[in-house]
Image: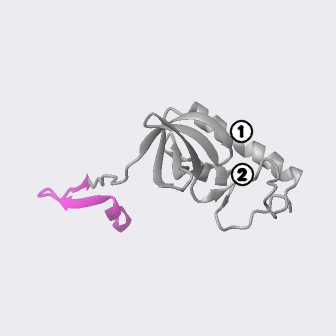
Amino acid sequence: MQHLSRYCRFFVGATGLLLCQAVMAACLCSHTPATLVDVLDGNTMALEIKGEQKIVHLAGIITPRLAPEPASKDNWCEAEGAKALQAKEYAGKLLSKASEITLAEQQTNEAGELSAVVYVDKLSLGQELLYKYLAVETGERASWCD
């Protein structure tokens, strides 16, 4: 019964019956609604936010690259490109079928691009990509070509 105390306040009435009153906590977070314009890659999309089109990067995750970047010294291989295509298609599928897309924890860089946690029908898109092994967390070693 002790483990339930996190979710309920217990009262013992005159009859000796245990009554449970649910404790509800309001979310203090603010989520910004968005509309899908286009999926650019696994963790980058164009969204319409408050009537303005913005490029949004998923915060905290890295997906494979679709093609080698000329300025990058990181190795790229066809396996990374194939995995990148899977990530883009999966993100696109979730976003295009969503009844609700919202953003949280937004940060804007100098180029005006956003980094945000993107929710698709209340599920974190970044977490969904991680669950499918189509992304790694920022700071982790990506082994797409190993």
Q: How many labels sit on residues?
A: 2
Residue tagged 1:
89
Residue in the image at 57% along x and 47% along y: 56
Q: Residue 138 location in percent, x, y?
A: 64, 63
Identify the mark at residue 134; answer none if there is no mark. 2
Q: Secondary structure at mark 2?
A: loop
Depth check, front residue: 99 or 24: 99
Q: Amino acid at mark 2?
A: Leu
Q: Residue 78 location in percent, x, y?
A: 88, 50
Task: Quarter of the image for the C terminus: give it.
Answer: bottom right
Residue in the image at 61% along x and 42% along y: 45
Q: Secondary structure at mark 1?
A: helix
- Residue 130 placement, left or right of 36: right
- Quarter residue 18 falls in: bottom left
The residue range painted magenta reads 1-21
- Residue 47 placement, left or right of 88: left
Q: Amino acid at mark 1?
A: Glu
